[in-house]
Image: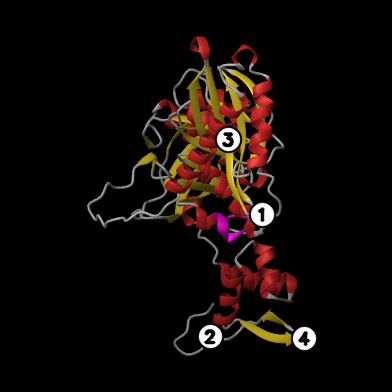
Amino acid sequence: MTLQVTAGGFDQGLPLSDGNKLRFVVRALRLEPSGVHGRIYVFRNDVCLSFTNINIERHSERVTLSNSAHKMLGADKDYMPTDTLKHYLDLFCKDVIDQTSIVNAPVMEHGDPMGAPQTYLAEPHVLEEGGTILYGKRGGGKSYTALLVGVAIDAGVNSLWHTKQRKIMYINLERPPSSIRRRIGHVNGALGLDFDRPLMTLHARGKKITDIRDSIAEAVFREDIGGVILDSISRAGMGNLNDNAPANDIMDALNGVAPSWLAIAHPPRGGDNVFGSIMFENAADVIVRLKSQRDGDRRLGVRLEIEKANDLPPTKPLTFDYRFDDDGLTQASKSTQSEFTDLYAEGKVKNSDKLFEWLINEKQEATAGEAAREFSMDRTAVSRIFSNDKRFIPHRQGKETFYRAVVREAEPHEGAY
């Protein structure tokens, strides 16, 4: 029997009588403290005889599954006795465990400074075999931008980005299907495509990303998906996004099933960074900040700035000009600095300045932990700012250290804050 790698698992078949085939399939493989777990199916051709979610290393659970499947074999029972079916199931599970160990085994990698350069699905924002986080203020054009890049890659349109055509799947966790259909139609029109051109879409409003991980993996394999768009991280349903564990679960789910991905994120209230744990930013290869400027009710300038790019050269921001009518987006084109001057004049507020203004005007004093939660920043980074910036004065209250902000006169040779 040959073990075949499939979407999210393995598949193995062996002949029965009269050209029929017995198949073992495993999905949702995961390593838990008690062993390797997975959802195992036993098929006769395309008919499922039995399935269960088990520890595939545990003998008694394999016996139960093989007995259950054997009862459903019908005329093939004599051709495939109970002990024989159990033996083949044992071999299948052993091969799965062995193959999983090989996939996860270390290898000797030789340095290659002339190796293949990074390639893009949409240059410079979406890497091939990489992950991108796109964030910006509410109502600034993130969803339209994500759909634009997704449809552009899917159709091979190069008017906004230089693309490499790959099939894209849009994962909708936020809006009703009717809203997504309308937006896809508007985006198609803005890119010069037929309004009714389809885009592979997974509607999962109100579901966790882990609930649909297997569905994503199956679709990626079955439909030859080259990248996914997730709208959005804040709707991924994994708990408090400020905690590291939920952030890691979301990023692991995306990295585990998507060849390339772009995920929409939001900033915290009054903040200028990705809302949630620092693990989101750590896991992404590219982080893109979206800024926008309205020009009346029918025009929106959108500027995309790369804030983080692993192993990529510095890249100039891209600015787009979006036009709208009463129903939605009608045009999308590249723009220039002269058309949206506010986007270029606006500077990013430093984290130290945000903390200073917050303590001066609102809070008066706070611990590093309180400040980190308020602005969705890493606590260690906040502590470093408080310790190194002379505008912040510490004082102890019991076991806690609180910080106050004070306005100082400029010292000799030191500029004003």
38, 292: nearer the viewer: 38
Circle nearer the viewer, 1 or 3: 3
Q: Are marks 2 and 3 in contact (CB under 8 Å)?
A: no
Residue beneath label 1, please? Answer: 241
* In the image: residue 376, left or right of residue 396: left
Residue beneath label 2, please? Answer: 410
What amino acid does circle 1 point to?
A: Leu
Label 3 neighbourhood size at 10 Å, few (<14), some (14-19), many (20+)?
many
Classify the position of the N terminus by image quarter.
top left
Label 4 neighbourhood size at 10 Å, few (<14), some (14-19), many (20+)?
few
Q: Which residues are magenta?
A: 274-280
- Residue 391 in sight: yes
Q: Does residue 366 lie above or below 337 as drawn?
A: below
Q: CA distance from mark 1 to mark 3?
A: 27 Å
Residue 224 lies, in percent from the top left, at: 45, 28
* Label 2 or label 3, whichever comes before in sequence order: 3
Q: Residue at x 47, y 90 (%)?
A: 412
Q: CA distance from mark 1 to mark 2?
A: 39 Å
Circle 4: element type: loop
Q: CA distance from mark 1 to mark 4?
A: 29 Å
250, 410: nearer the viewer: 250
Q: CA distance from mark 2 to mark 3?
A: 64 Å
Give the number of the disc on residue 27: 3
Residue 264 among those drawn in magenta: no
* Label 1 or label 4, whichever comes before in sequence order: 1
Residue beneath label 4, please? Answer: 398
Residue 293 lies, in percent from the top left, at: 55, 46
